Amino acid sequence: MKIAIACHPTHGGSGVVAAELGMRLAGRGNEVHFVSYERPFRLDPLTQGIHFHKVQVSSYPLFRYPPYALALANELLQVVQREGVEIIHAHYAIPHSLAAVLARNMDTDGDVKVFTTLHGTDITLVGSDPSYAGITRWAIEQSDRVTVVSDWLAAATIKELAPEVEIETIPNAIDSSIFSPEHRDTQLRARFATPDELLVAHVSNFRPVKRVDDVVSAFAIAARDLPARLLMIGQGPELVKAQEKARQLGVYDRISWLGPIDDIAALLASSDLFLLPSENESFGLAALEAMSSGLPVVATRSGGLPDVVVDGETGLLAEVGDIESLAAHCHRLLTDAPLRHKMSSTARKVATEKFGWESVLHCYENAYRQLLSPVE
Ligand code: GMT
């Protein structure tokens, strides 16, 4: 099959899933064309069967806001026509599904299909914003096939936008050879913690939905009487506020603020515990990457997270904003080594057995085939 993938190239779960999926599809003999303003950071451009097409967004004095969605639609149309693409797989509704629908509709002589995968904030934040709600709903309804990454997101999409379209869940997956405890690196770990210190990790885009303040607050309470340190990996609008909170709570010097890092596998494997206190997560790919690396996860009972982090088995859950409980869970896992090790191996087992790429790839390929040859 010839597939074009439109996705966000920056750090964030949807771009990661798109890149990982695309490389696997290419590995199975499909031709995959990525279309974005930058190469997605997890995409290896040298993978056989992978092509990257950069969207050029020209500036013009009258354009206060350059119309990226239109430039993307234009590039998608060219790629579809030039390369004979059969399916445009759009990850994230706005602008990708919208641009894909425009490209399909412009391709009047062709028969390209639009496959939309919704990831979370495209519904819960962008799609629920009155400025984008109508067009998000329209782009979803105009898609030829729509999937979401969790049942929770399916319900949220129906609640927010009530699109008149069938929605199917295909969960996210993990490459357990990349995210593996085997990548534990003692020299790397020694840069952040002494041998008697435990290492807590958080990875996100530091948006308000991630509640990074709560990461700092829970760590400050949990680590009050413990030798522990915190890795804050990522960057975003809440960073400065979180740093200020760390200063107020006297833990600033026990935190390494690492900024965005493309390859976090060794850092995760070299840590002891993962903390993700989000307001909501449609899925929580970051938690799954941590679990696959052998880390128990302390997270919130929100969105699709409880389907990934099994409370009491692969981690411990608390209500959103309940900093005391988050801290108590962290403290318990940091002080009870047998429990931590038990959850670490169950986390690894669940990640590899329940969230492997094989079945997910199979689901996507089946869905593509059905789209190209629908049963009468
Ligand atoms: O907010 C983010 O984490 C970024 C966002 C994205 O689109 O990159 O992540 C969403 O998609 C991921 C991949 O499907 C999910 O694992 C995340 O849970 C989801 N984020 C939210 O729902 C907040």
Image: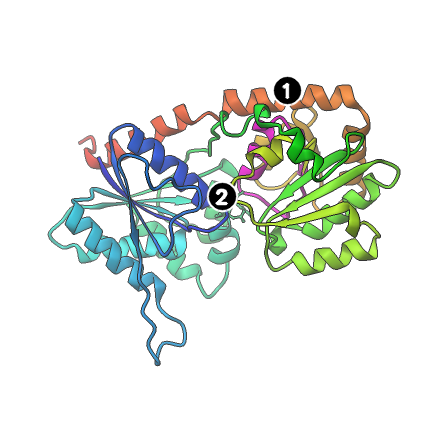
* Crowd rating for badge 2 (residues with CA inside 10 Å; few <14, some 14–19, many 20+): some
| CB of mark 2 near ligand 1 (< 8 Å) | yes
Residue 316 is situated, as x and y percent measured from the top left of the image, at: 71, 31
Left or right, 161 with reference to 78: right
- Please say if 361 is above or below 87: above
- Please say if 273 is above or below 127: above
- Whether 66 is among the magenta residues is no
| Residue pointed to by mark 2 | 13
Residue at 60 percent across and 25 percent down: it is: 181
| Residue pointed to by mark 1 | 345
Residue type at mark 1: give it: Ser
Q: Secondary structure at mark 1?
A: helix
Residues shaded magenta: 275-300
Q: Say which quadrant the N terminus sits in.
A: top left
Residue 170 position by quadrant: top left
Q: Which mark is residue 260?
A: none
Residue 275 position by quadrant: top right
- Please say if 245 is above or below 4: below
Left or right, 273 with reference to 36: right
Residue 184 is situated, as x and y percent measured from the top left of the image, at: 62, 27
Residue 322 position by quadrant: top right
